[in-house]
Amino acid sequence: MEGSYVDTIGAMGPLTPELFDLVIALISFLTVFAILARVLLPRIEKVLKERDEAIDGTTARAADIEEEARRVRDQYRADLTAARQEAARLRQTAAEEGASLLAVLREEGQKEREKVVASARTQLEADRIIAEAELREATFALALELAGRIVGETLDDLPNARTIADDFFAELDEPEKSLRT
């Protein structure tokens, strides 16, 4: 068993490295490793850092844009709620005026009363149509402005924007018309 280790090394034949070859290989490896560590590794780290910063910047911009969109949406909803409340107030005021007008007209007679009531209803319908048209125009302008802010361009010169808006409002009017009849 005395020479078993030496015999084992010698048994490897041409795969047995010389000490000199091992030292040269180790020096070569360390040299290549040092060059890569000094030249290539800093460049890789720089590229990775730049990529991380770009991703963080994009994420921050996306969050800012999303927050702005939420703010605009909330403002739009608040404006729409205010417009609905104003319309309800106007309807209430119109109803109160109509009731007091009816009391006065009863004294003047049946024929005159029917004539004034028909006139008041026509006026209310005209006011409603005007208010609806103004609300549609305001909604259309707000929608174009909001879409322009989101897209980053003005959309006022879009040729079919008016057609799209009119189609949308027509779809909204269909359930209202069925409720009125």
Image (spheres, grey):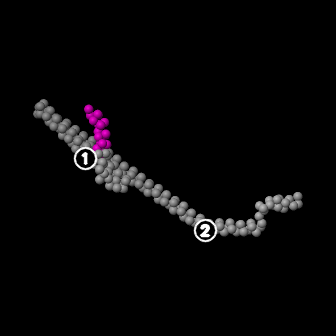
- Identify which residue is drawn at 14% across, 36% down: 116
Q: Residue lying furthest right in this view?
A: 2
- Identify which residue is drawn at 29% across, 39% down: 173
Q: Label 2 is placed on what type of residue?
A: Arg
- Identify which residue is drawn at 31% across, 39% down: 171
Looking at the image, is 11 positioned above or below residue 173? below
Q: Label 1 is placed on what type of residue?
A: Glu
Q: Which mark is residue 38?
A: 2
Which span of residues is magenta-colored?
Answer: 165-181
Can residue 126 be seen in the rendering of this structure? yes
Horizontal and vertical percent position of residue 82: 30, 46
Q: Quadrant of residue 62?
A: bottom left
Give the Cα distance between marks 2 and 1.
Answer: 70 Å
Horizontal and vertical percent position of residue 121: 19, 37
Q: Residue lying furthest top in this view?
A: 110
Residue that numbered label 1 is attached to: 134
Front residue of 27 and 47: 27
Which class describes the residues within 10 Å of circle 2: few (<14), some (14-19), or many (20+)?
few
- Closer to the chain start, of discs 2 and 1, is 2
Horizontal and vertical percent position of residue 35: 63, 68
Label 2 element class: helix
- Magenta includes 168? yes
Horizontal and vertical percent position of residue 46: 54, 64
- Magenta includes 172? yes
